[in-house]
Image (cartoon, rainbow, N blue to C red):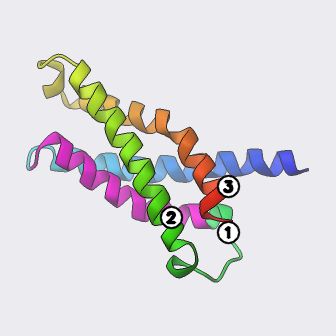
Amino acid sequence: MRGFRITRQMYESAAVGTISTFSGLGLSSLLDGIASLDVSNLVGLLFESVVDFFGQKLVFAPNSSSNLTGFGGRFVVGKAVAILITQVIFMGFMRLMSEKDRKKPMDIQFARLAAAVLAWIPHFVLRKYWIFV
């Protein structure tokens, strides 16, 4: 039965991550014309982090009365690692793209989404086995 729980948590965590990721992508996209791509991406990742914390808490610790104080320190450290991983992947993708492609909004969003997908596995492991224990 434990295997089922892990699989269910993976799907639930992925759903929460998808919602929070798309909220961050939307904010980053709005900020692209105002700030540099690296800054707008980072702001989107920070916003996504807040949404993600509360959603992931519902997945991994639904009956816990603790919120930021109980899981906050580990979440902040884990999220900093997750943001760093995602940002490095995104910046790597951007540097691999041609100058012309770096100006296309859809290509930028695709690079952001691809970075989030690639970084999902270490995010899940951090949440499951360290943050919400």
Mark 2 residue element: helix
Could you tell me which quadrant the C terminus lies in?
A: bottom right
Front residue (pair 61, 23) = 61
Q: Which residue is mark 3?
A: 129
Q: Position of residue 108 (x, y in %)?
A: 25, 31
Query: Left or right: where does residue 49 sit relative to residue 6?
Result: left
Query: Left or right: where does residue 122 sit relative to residue 113?
Result: right
Tell me, for residue 61, which label it has, or none.
1
Q: Which residue is mark 2?
A: 75
Question: Label 1 to label 3, Cα distance in Å?
Answer: 12 Å
Q: Which residues are magenta?
A: 35-57
Q: Quadrant of residue 90?
A: top left
Question: Label 2 to label 3, Cα distance in Å?
Answer: 12 Å
Question: Type of residue at label 2?
Answer: Phe
Question: Type of residue at label 3?
Answer: Tyr
Q: Position of residue 30 (x, y in %)?
A: 19, 49
Of callouts 2 and 1, the N-terminal one:
1
Please determine whether, in this image, residue 90 is positioned above or below residue 69. above
What residue do we see at 55% from left, 78% from top? 67
Of callouts 2 and 3, the N-terminal one:
2
Q: Residues within 10 Å of mark 3 (few under 14, many from 20)?
A: few
What residue do we see at 9% from left, 44% from top? 33
Of callouts 1 and 3, the N-terminal one:
1
